[in-house]
Every structure is written in structure tokens, then in C-alpha cells.
Amino acid sequence: MTEIRTPRLLLRRWHDGDLAPMAEINADPRVMRLVDDGRVRDLEQTAEEIERWEEEWDDEGYGLFAVELLASGELAGFTGLFVPEFLPEAASDAAIGWRLGAQFWGQGYASEAAQATLEFALQDRGLERVVAIHRAEDQASENVVRKLAMALERETTHPVSGHALRVHGIDLTEYQA
């Protein structure tokens, strides 16, 4: 079982008990406003997402980790790697992503988990390159990407929603653990 411990977090595969807390996160309009089309997701949709995330682990050897707070055992959300199939020009890369419940914002958890995930991608999984894709107006994600030392590579448009996106990247030669 793949797990990563940081000073405050446990990044791990998904458990049955994660469904309800992740569904609460996905049901929060504040969390979802910059995700895909901005719609919230219900329990069934969240279960389908988690199933897809777990399948990606099997298919790619990486995926989205459940992020658990070590101090309390609470599920804070996810971070990890995925194949950005929605964006054809980046679909050959592994992308790093995150989604945390609003009560966990502003505490450095996303940056801590993303840094651990980036190290996992480039050092443990041997990936040569990782990208991050976020909506252009998502300043919180822009801050996380900056902390990861990822360079802005291009601005583009989501092929379905039409939202402005920023694509950042880093390769193994640029990465400093």
C-alpha cells in the first residue's frame, strides 16, 4: 500500500470510510466553484470519482491520494497525480492536483501534500515531468504551484467549458527536493 507521511499529513489510498467526508467536500459550492463546470457532486458521483481514482492507481501506478490529518484522522480531501485527458495538449503528462475541504484552506496543507506528491512523482515513480493545470482565476492554486517552483508554460482554454486555464510544468532536471 502506497503511503506518504509529511509532518502533518498522511497521503494514502482510499478507504470505504472516506466516501462520506469526501462527498461533503464535493457538496460544498465554495470548494467546487473552480472545479470543472462548478457543479457540486452528490454521494453517488463522489463514489464514482473515488472508483475512477483507484482505477488510475491500477492503470498508471499513481493516482489521487486521500489526505488525512495526522493529528485528528480527519479526511481533508485529496492530492495526487492524474492523467489530464480533458486537455489534449497535456494528456501525455502526469498532472498534480488537489481538492481540500474549505475548513482546511489557508493552513498550508495543500502545499505540503503537493510537495510530497511532486517528490513521489519524480523520485519514487520516476516520472520525467509533471504539470499542474488550474483555472486562471484560481489564486490559491497559483500560490501552491509557485511554492512547487513550477513554471508557467502556457495559457489555454478548457475545450469543453471554455474557462481560461494555466498550465505549469516542472521536469526532473529542474526539481530540487
Image (cartoon, rainbow, N blue to C red):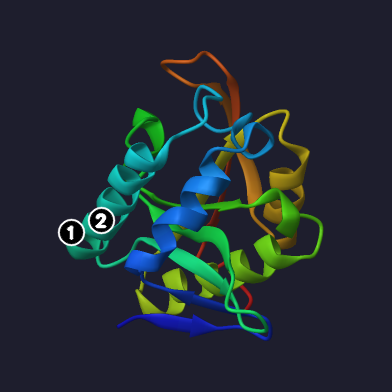
The image position of residue 108, as x and y in percent, is: 76, 65
Of all residues, the one furthest to the right in this rendering is 106
Compared to residue 30, the image places residue 163 above or below, namely above
Task: State the image coordinates of residue 44 (x, y, percent, origin top left).
Answer: 32, 40
Specify the quadrant of the image occupied by residue 148.
bottom right
Residue drawn at x 46%, y 66% as measured from the top left? 66
User: Residue 143 location in percent, x, y?
Assistant: 77, 50
* Residue beneath the point at 34% across and 45% down: 49
Using residue 17 as the reference point, say whether residue 152 is left or right of it.
Answer: right
Residue 111's label in the rendered image is none
- According to the picture, the residue beneath numbered tag 1 turns out to be 59
User: 27 above or below 115?
Assistant: above
Give the answer, above or below, for where 17 lies relative to 85.
below
**Which residue lies under the disc numbered 2?**
56
Q: Secondary structure at mark 1?
A: helix
Q: Amino acid at mark 1?
A: Asp
Say if residue 132 shows up in the picture: no
> Are dots 1 and 2 in contact, CB under 8 Å?
yes
User: At x 33% / y 53%, what residue is drawn?
Assistant: 50
As helix, strand or loop, the secondary structure at mark 2 comes to helix
Disc 1 packing (10 Å; few <14; some 14–19; many ≥20):
few
| Side (left or right) of 52 relative to 78 | left
Q: Residue furthest left?
A: 59
Q: Amino acid at mark 2?
A: Glu
